[in-house]
């Protein structure tokens, strides 16, 4: 199931505002369709997608650890 959070534009500003934490991250296209979901360290995953991916939007849910983020990914 998709996260129930608002989409944010995938920009440098959004990447810079991401907390230094692990989480479940959903990337979306311009229409708000989820195109990918990953578990990882939020700033790193966002920077990578901004540099090399093709997503337009992002939303995330913080996790307590990488293992917790991976569990959230499995449960979605």
Image (cartoon, rainbow, N blue to C red):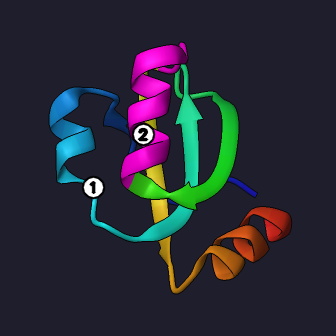
Who is closer to the viewer here, 13 or 75?
Answer: 13
Determine if residue 5 is in view: no
* Residue 62 shown in magenta: no
Residue located at (54% from left, 13% from top): 54
Of the numbered discs in the image, which one, if any, rests on residue 37? none
Rendered location of residue 11, percent (x, y): 25, 26
Instruction: Answer with the quarter of the image where residue 16 lies.
Output: top left
Assign the magenta stretch its main secondary structure.
helix
Query: If you read the primary sequence from the N terminus, does the residue marked by circle 1 or circle 2 appear first?
Result: 1
Image quarter where the N terminus lies is: bottom right
Task: Report crowding for label 2: few under 14, some 14 to 19, many 20 or more residues within 10 A (C-alpha).
Answer: many
Rendered location of residue 55, percent (x, y): 51, 20
Image quarter where the C terminus lies is: bottom right
Q: CA distance from mark 1 to mark 2?
A: 8 Å
- Circle 2 sits on which residue? 46
Contact (Cβ within 8 Å) of mark 1 with mark 2: yes
Furthest toward the bottom, the residue is 64
- What are the residue bounds of the magenta stretch? 43-55
Does 76 sit left or right of 58 as displayed?
A: right
Circle 2 — which element? Answer: helix
- Circle 1 sits on which residue? 18
Circle 1 — which element? Answer: loop
Rendered location of residue 46, percent (x, y): 42, 39
Does 3 sit left or right of 51 as displayed?
A: right
Residue located at (68% from left, 44% from top): 37
Determine if residue 40 is in view: yes
């Amino acid at each position: 199931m998709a996260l129930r959070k608002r989409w944010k534009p995938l920009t440098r500003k959004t990447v810079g505002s991401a907390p230094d934490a692990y989480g479940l991250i959903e990337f979306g296209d311009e229409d708000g369709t989820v195109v990918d979901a990953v578990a990882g360290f939020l700033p790193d995953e966002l920077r990578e997608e901004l540099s090399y991916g093709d997503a337009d939007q992002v939303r995330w849910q913080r996790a307590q650890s990488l293992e917790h983020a991976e569990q959230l990914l499995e449960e979605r």
